[in-house]
Image (cartoon, grey):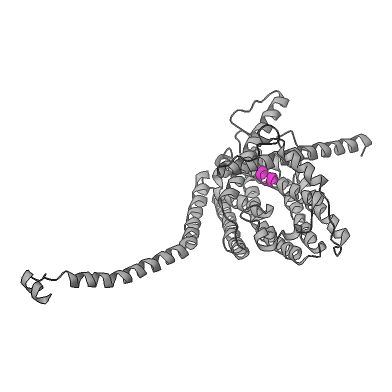
Amino acid sequence: MRIVDFFLIILGLLVLFTALSVVVLSLTWLERKFLGRLQRRLGPNRTGPMGLLQPVADAVKLVLKEDILPSSADRAIFWVAPLVVLVPSFMLWVTIPAAENLVLRNVDMGLFYIIAFSVITILGLVLAGWGSANKYGILGGLRSSAQLISYEIPVIMVVIAVAMMAQSLNLIHITNFQLPGIQSITPETARLEAGIQNVPFAVLQPLGMVIFLIAGLAEVGRTPFDIYFAESEIVGGPFVEYSGAHWSVFFLAEYMNTFIIAALTALLFLGGWHGPFNPTSPQWLESLVGVVWFLVKTYFVILVIFWIRGTFPRLRIDQLMAFAWQVVVPLSFANILITGVFMYYGWPWWSLTLMSLTLSSVIGYLIYKHVTAPARKVAEVYNRRRMIERQPRRQAGRQSSGPSAGPEEAVSGG
């Protein structure tokens, strides 16, 4: 490798890191503003116009804040853990394209690369809890590993289903496969071209998109899956002993991962950088418009994630794990099954959509019945108690409604 190429790579990584840092600042401002509107309050509005400089002020505060190291902590593990969490989140963007011609390195096994690197984050959270020498930190690290391993399985299964339909692990090809006029690269895609090509995978696999988004929220640790650092249960989880700049590294990694989940949802299911108005030339204009469409779809998914945070309460650890192994994991395998049946028999594209929607409706109804069962039981007991209380009143009313005594009997009786 020439020295010039090496410096170009370093420059590209610096530009990428700067862009992601700006994105994180925008996400913190957008989340606080959006949650403020949902909860009928203003959100940040003091620092800068419309509070736009509030994320900058928060970043400066975190950098200047005192960084404390516990006396009993393992110094090496304590300092390395934040980097183990942040570096994989950053390295994933090496192969995530913002447009067809705007990617740091297009990898044919891009989805495999993303799944492999994302798993390393689990190690960083466990090391953060262990290196803190804090029992609550260790408990939070163990909870995080259990949660992330459980919800990693549905993510992998959905990615496999998408790769089965596109017959590729290349993110650019998967995105282009959802648009018409793309030439097939394998005989398998040629056979399926008339059926599923030019249809977004969100239409073909609505169940897969929902599973991917739910499991992605659990992987990031966003509400309602933020159980491993829930202040109401175990103080601060694996981050309880971190402060200042080192705590901000975990914060930065969380928002970078949130943006990654939204970006992958846009690429795998919403057509990525393709929109209804895409110019074909010149190339720079095509790339610019593609980036705009990519950001619009990504930020739309991010708003959905913020809406979920402002709407749903936090799950308990037993509910979280039961939901993973009893609902999400079986559904991910069922999604693989219906995708395989659809591809084997070569049915029209709408048959996969129908199977996915039917399965989603059935599971949604069963979950609704299970969640509302305690409320129905309480209502049934309450109604039964009211019926029992009304019976003596009815009997007393019947006795008092007998033939009334005449005036003479009433006087003599008085």
Is residue 84 positioned above or below 34 on the image? below
| Above or below for 161 versus 3 | below
Please give the count of numbered marks on the rendered protein.
Answer: 0
Q: In which quarter of the image is residue 130?
A: bottom right
Residue stretch rendered in magenta on the structure: 258-264
Out of 130 and 299, give the one closest to the viewer: 130
Q: Position of residue 144 (x, y in %)?
A: 71, 60
Q: Which of 70 and 131 is in front in this view?
A: 70
Query: Residue pushed farthest left?
Result: 408
User: Residue 359's x, y, as percent?
Assistant: 50, 55
Q: In this view, does 357 lie to the left or right of 215?
A: left
Q: Position of residue 79 (x, y in %)?
A: 85, 55
Quadrant position of residue 189: top right
Q: Can residue 343 be seen in this view?
A: no
For image coordinates 74% across by 33% down, the residue present is 101
Q: Position of residue 125 (x, y in %)?
A: 76, 58
Q: Main secondary structure of the magenta part?
A: helix
Among the 4 quarters of the image, the one containing residue 34: top right
Look at the image and tell me in which quarter the N terminus lies: top right
- The C terminus lies in quadrant: bottom left
Observer able to see residue 125: yes
Instruction: Name the side, left or right, on which 123 lies relative to 403.
Output: right
Q: Residue at x 24, y 69 (%)?
A: 394
Q: Is residue 346 magenta?
A: no
